[in-house]
Amino acid sequence: MRHWLPALALMAAVTLCGCAGMVNSVSDFMGAGPWWEADQADKITSRARELEAHGELTMALDHWRLVDRISGGQAAASREITRIQNKITEAVNAHYRNGMAELRKKNQAAARNHFLAALRLDPAFQPALIQINARFSTFPLAARLSVPGDRPATVAEKVFSDKEKAFLVAWFNDLPMAEAMTPGTLLILPKLEKTPPKKVYTKKPPNHLAEANALLAKNSLDGALAIVEQANPDDPDVKAMLHAIRMKQAAAQIEAGRPEAARPYLAMVPDGFAGKDAALKALQAALQRQQTSLVLLKARAHFDQGEYRQSLDLLETLQKDGPENVAVRDLAAEARYRLALDHFDHKRFLEARDVLKKADGSHKASMALKGTVRSRLLELAQIHYRNGVKHFINEDLKSAIADWEKALICNPDHEKARENIDNARRLMQKVETLP
């Protein structure tokens, strides 16, 4: 959202100035240069460097990606993206090393701050995430190093006195159930009371669906998916749970502004599954919004280059699909006014009138220009009418009719011209039928 603030502010200024009748000021303001042209990306580049200087590396990276996008993938922007990514990686690793050093000094608060700083730069950085979950999570967790021969079942026996809790060891650490671990592997385990020895009963399989439902309620999609994938894939309830998880994954991608990434998740959900139709509609709406943003950027670029006809064509297409878009509506009104004004300045009054037929009544400059164009056309209609009369007096009926027709084009309400055309045509017919 922050990337759009300058554009929205500028549009608001244009609209206000136009409403106040300050046409010359608006013209000077709008002619200052395009906002999103690749050759005008200096402001975004400057902002990226400013953010980097203040330590806001991820925001700086976002700005460089925007520069790369609107400049057509120039090598300079790509190099800056790679440089910032490397800088983020170095900073993440440095924070993690400092956090581990503070842990060895038993400085818990300082260690936590370093791990959180690493995650702020890279939320997916697993080493820091493991330390936060193991040492600072509100959920009671404990860390343990594996020894040779350890498997999830043997660890569950040692820690929980219950081999049936092997699935907890596997799930908390993303480990396969049957394979041996590498000695020295850091294990994150929940703190549970040891289960007293049980009498020998028939073992019941873990209730994967209940566990997955609990995780899904907490919006832990990856955790729920990991549990479900361990259950019987032929079980209808397991299939339904898996489809529900895919639907939530798709919704998360759409909400994050990545509609294309939602497609694969929805493709794995069969047609007819509850909620899929609504999800597909949401996906289509998100794709439409994304397409509208891209077309609006292109329309702005045409507008800033003075290509008002091209800009207006794009904007009118967007208005057909989404007439409620205020940014599209305001830019279309200004582009329509600029195009009509260009026709007027070049004495193309008929073209100006045609453009202003769709003018927004709230755009005062357009309404004023529309009145001026109408006055000029009325004057032209009178000129053509008088010329027609002269031709009629000189018995040049064809030229008279031609001028009167031009008068009607300029002023469709000129009844005298219409009447004279009918009289002249009847007279011509009589003359042509004379013996």
Image: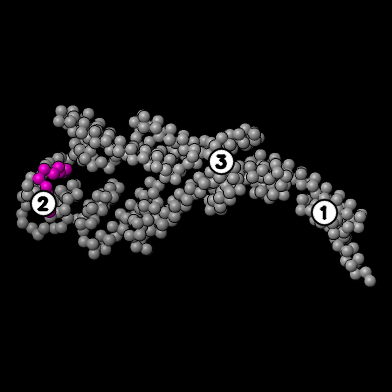
Q: Nearer the viewer, mark 2 or mark 3?
A: 3
Amino acid type of the residue tagged 3 in the rendering: Asp
- Neighbor class of circle 1 (other Cα within 10 Å; few <14, some 14-19, many 20+) is many
Q: Is residue 151 left or right of residue 434?
A: left
Amino acid type of the residue tagged 2 in the rendering: Ala
Q: Position of residue 35 (x, y in %)?
A: 51, 38
Q: Nearer the viewer, residue 220 or 398?
A: 398
- Identify the residue position indicated by label 3 in the image: 304
SS of the residue under disc 3: helix
Q: Position of residue 39 (x, y in %)?
A: 49, 39
Report the residue at 51% width, 49% height from top: 295
* Mark 1 or mark 3: whose residue is earlier in sequence: 3
* Location of residue 315 with respect to 5 vertically, above or below: below
Report the residue at 11% width, 43% height from top: 184
Whether the magenta-drawn stretch holds residue 264 is answered as: no
- Neighbor class of circle 3 (other Cα within 10 Å; few <14, some 14-19, many 20+) is many
SS of the residue under disc 1: helix
Report the residue at 91% width, 57% height from top: 395
- Identify the residue position indicated by label 1 in the image: 403
- Identify the residue position indicated by label 2 in the image: 180
Amino acid type of the residue tagged 1 in the rendering: Asp
Q: Is residue 116 left or right of residue 429?
A: left
Whether the magenta-drawn stretch holds residue 183 is answered as: yes
Q: Nearer the viewer, mark 2 or mark 1?
A: 1
